[in-house]
Amino acid sequence: MRADILVPGPPAEGEGLALSAPISFWGGVDPKSGRIVDVRHPQHGASIGGSVLFLPDTIGSSSASAVLLELVRGGKAPAAIVMHQPDAILLLGLIVAREMGWAGPIALRLDRDAHGRFAGRCVSVTADGMLALSSL
């Protein structure tokens, strides 16, 4: 399945983590551990680090880009980010990471109706935006 590239990045592979609710990176994700710390979020406690993260939506915060930047710097970022709709503030964190010479994940746009088919499965993502189920 092909997705639209929002921010280019390297090929990736990881377990598909399809969030069932929007998330705020500011206060919702611990930038040091990569865990979802918002106790109200259905996936509270899950680690986004190394996953192919499917976001149905985000809850805006101007600090989301800083949290994502810290996740990249600390090696706790997702392997790839797949969004229903682009979030310019969040994606800015990936652009800044590249400007600083840090390898960040590819970011893609794919309709949220397709996210669930990747949940809990090993997902490979190519640099040209192809998503497929794979085996580690």
Image (spheres, grey):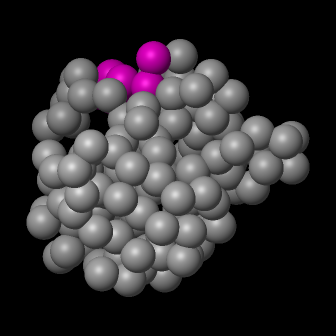
Task: Please say if 41 is above or below 45.
Answer: below
Number of labels in the image equals 0
Instruction: Using the rendered image of the protein, determine whether residue 55 is visible from the camera's viewpoint.
Output: no
Task: Please say if 30 is above or below 88.
Answer: above
Q: Main secondary structure of the magenta part?
A: loop
The location of residue 84, given as percent across then percent down, is 36, 71
The location of residue 72, given as percent across then percent down, is 63, 35
Instruction: Compare residues 90 and 104 and report the one nearer the observer.
Output: 104
In the image, what residue occupies the spot 59% across and 39% down?
68
The location of residue 2, given as percent across then percent down, is 38, 83
Instruction: Using the rendered image of the protein, determine whether residue 42 is visible from the camera's viewpoint.
Output: yes
**Residue 39 falls left or right of residue 36:** left
Instruction: Compare residues 121 and 88 and report the one nearer the observer.
Output: 121
The location of residue 121, given as percent across then percent down, is 16, 51
Residue 71 figure quarter = top right
99 in magenta:
no
**Looking at this rendering, what residue extends furthest in the top direction?**
32
**Residue 70 falls left or right of residue 61:** right
In the image, what residue occupies the spot 22% across and 63% down?
133
The residue stretch that appears in magenta: 33-38
| Quarter the N terminus occupies | bottom left
In the image, what residue occupies the spot 64% across and 46% down?
104
| Quarter the C terminus occupies | top left
35 in magenta:
yes
**Residue 66 falls left or right of residue 135:** right
